[in-house]
Amino acid sequence: MSRVYNFSAGPAVLPEQVLREAAEEMLDYKGCGMSVMEMSHRSRVFDDLIDETAADFRELLHIPDNYKVLFLQGGASLQFAMIPMNLMKNRVADYIVTGQWAKKAYQEAQKYGRANKIASSEDETFSYIPDCSDLPISPDADYVYICENNTIYGTKYKKLPNTKGKLLVSDVSSCFLSEPMDVTKYGIVYGGVQKNIGPAGMVISIVREDLITEDVLPGTPTMMQFKTHAENRSMYNTPNCYCIYICGKVFKWLKSMGGLEAMKERNEKKAALLYNFLDESQLFQGTVRREDRSLMNVPFVTGDKEMDAKFVAAAAEAGFVNLKGHRSVGGMRASIYNAMPIEGVEKLVEFMKDFEKENR
């Protein structure tokens, strides 16, 4: 069977080159006679692998020396608790709620202190990013929290909020490494890797060193302290070794593609193909304000649930899979992450044009 075009929101498409390399090394990684799946994380071979992976990641994002890179488990959802546990010194934090994941992070933070919802786009089903130029930032807030790209709703911050000098914390799970970013604008920036970087099961967190202290909320478990992982090079306990290995291969692939500047250009081209068609279509419509559209996740509808279902089924039959929208919103969603080739989007648009002709 030939490979399908996989538009899943996560776990998601990976570069074919990476999968082929991993297949070749499955039984024998670099002549050691075993797979990365089998080796000790305390071995010299894995020690070199994790160091090289971290170095390539730092190079791609131009991460300054005063930030630590942590490979953590528990998914982005565990960070919803880990961040307030480590940062909420005053027991106050401000949250901008632009989707389901920001909302869950906001709700989780309420367990540890006063979480303030200072802006939201829930009034229009999270179809836009609110104006964040003059927010009611709390004077005693420990940080301001955002989810930068909203996977379910297809919105993206094009400009970071004015935090009025407060620390910015950002979940970038679904736009990680899709374009350059200035790490120095954040106190913490983190993301689950299963959308745009690697297989499921890991979060990469970039944490400014001055935020890594023993001064955490009382009762914070050892495993939930950034200090624990920073001091042990992400190997306090057994890390997700195979995930780190695949992520490392993706970093090499990104470098070979020209880095994040080249990826941004490529992603803009892919997104424009799909958005331009949606703007002209008589059958399909996008659901997001034009100025807030994500490059990674493109939700769209026909306005008729039966027609949506018919399209999803026909698309799957034609080799365009995982186009069904999130269960909470319905419709369709094409996730066009870094590893989705341009031809995948071109062929999807051709298919949508043909479907429209037959079903108008």
Image (cartoon, helix red, strand yellow):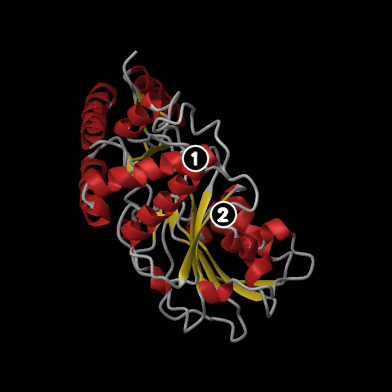
Name the residue furthest right: 219
- Determine whether the residue tagged by mark 2 lies in a helix, strand or loop: loop
Q: Quadrant of residue 159?
A: bottom left
Residue visible at 34% across and 13% down in the picture: 1
Horizontal side of 339 relative to 54 (left or right) equals left
Numbered label attached to residue 146: none
Name the residue furthest bottom: 139
Query: Which is more toward the observer, 182 or 311?
Result: 182
Numbered label attached to residue 243: 1
The C terminus lies in quadrant:
top left
Residue 79 shows in this picture? yes
Residue visible at 41% across and 59% down in the picture: 128
Mark 1, Cα crowd under 10 Å, few <14 / some 14-19 / many 20+, is many
Q: Is residue 319 above or below residue 274?
A: above
- Determine whether the residue tagged by mark 1 lies in a helix, strand or loop: helix
Mark 1 is on which residue type?
A: Cys
Q: Position of residue 25 (x, y in %)?
A: 40, 28
Numbered label attached to residue 234: 2
Q: Is residue 140 above or below residue 269?
A: below
Q: Quadrant of residue 92?
A: bottom right
Label 1 or label 2, whichever comes before in sequence order = 2
Q: Position of residue 163 (x, y in %)?
A: 47, 79
